Image: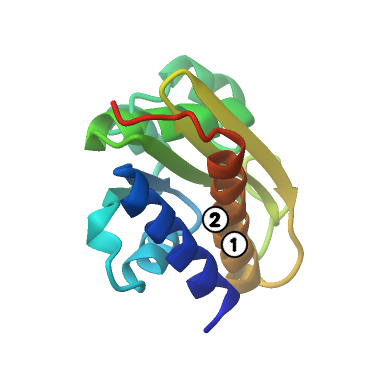
Amino acid sequence: MSTEDSICQELITDLSNAGLTVAVAESLTGGLLCAAFVHVPGASNALRGGVCTYATDTKHSVLKVSDQRLAQTGPVDDEVARQMAHGVRALMGADFGLSTTGVAGPGPADGHPAGTVYVGCAWEGGSRVQRLDLSGDRDQVRQGAVIASLELFREVLKATPNIHTR
């Protein structure tokens, strides 16, 4: 079993046992994060769904990310990741929302070098965002973003045992 599968299995089990759910909003990972959860048998007990808002304007139209923020900073931004996570949580009616946004490469985009990534996790009343500076080719950056997102979510679940269903 891969590290990704192992973490996803742990997360699905923990969420299912607690009666909690998660939804994902992805940009640079293009569905890989949602697919990582779906790869685990029993994912339907906890995964509400996912959206791929690859284009900047869809982050606003689908996830309600501030269009002013997007115009000011572009999509590669900690607050954009936070708003994406909150937006998908609300859209899907989930207890937790996860998000990925950044530059997979091969070259820079939006004034950021390849490998600049933000992953976010949101829940009612809180959120955490982590900036990553990943190296490697496009696939390695995208895979690194998935693993980092899963690890962030695992940390949040362990650190916030009093989170209850909505």
Q: Residue at x 60, y 38 (%)?
A: 76
Q: Is residue 147 left or right of residue 92?
A: right
Residue 164: x and y in percent read 37, 29
Q: Amino acid at mark 2?
A: Leu
Residue under label 2, please give it. 150
Q: Which mark is residue 83?
A: none
Residue 24: x and y in percent read 38, 47
Q: Residue at x 74, y 59 (%)?
A: 134
Disc 2 crowd rating (10 Å Cα; few below 14, some 14-19, many 20+) is many
Q: Residue at x 48, y 62 (%)?
A: 10
Render colour scheme? rainbow
* Image-quadrant location for residue 130: top right
Q: Mark 1 and mark 2 in contact (Cβ < 8 Å)? A: yes
Q: Is residue 70 left or right of residue 158?
A: left
**Residue 119, above or below 3:** above
**Residue 83, above or below 157:** above
Residue under label 1, please give it. 147
Secondary element type, mark 1: helix
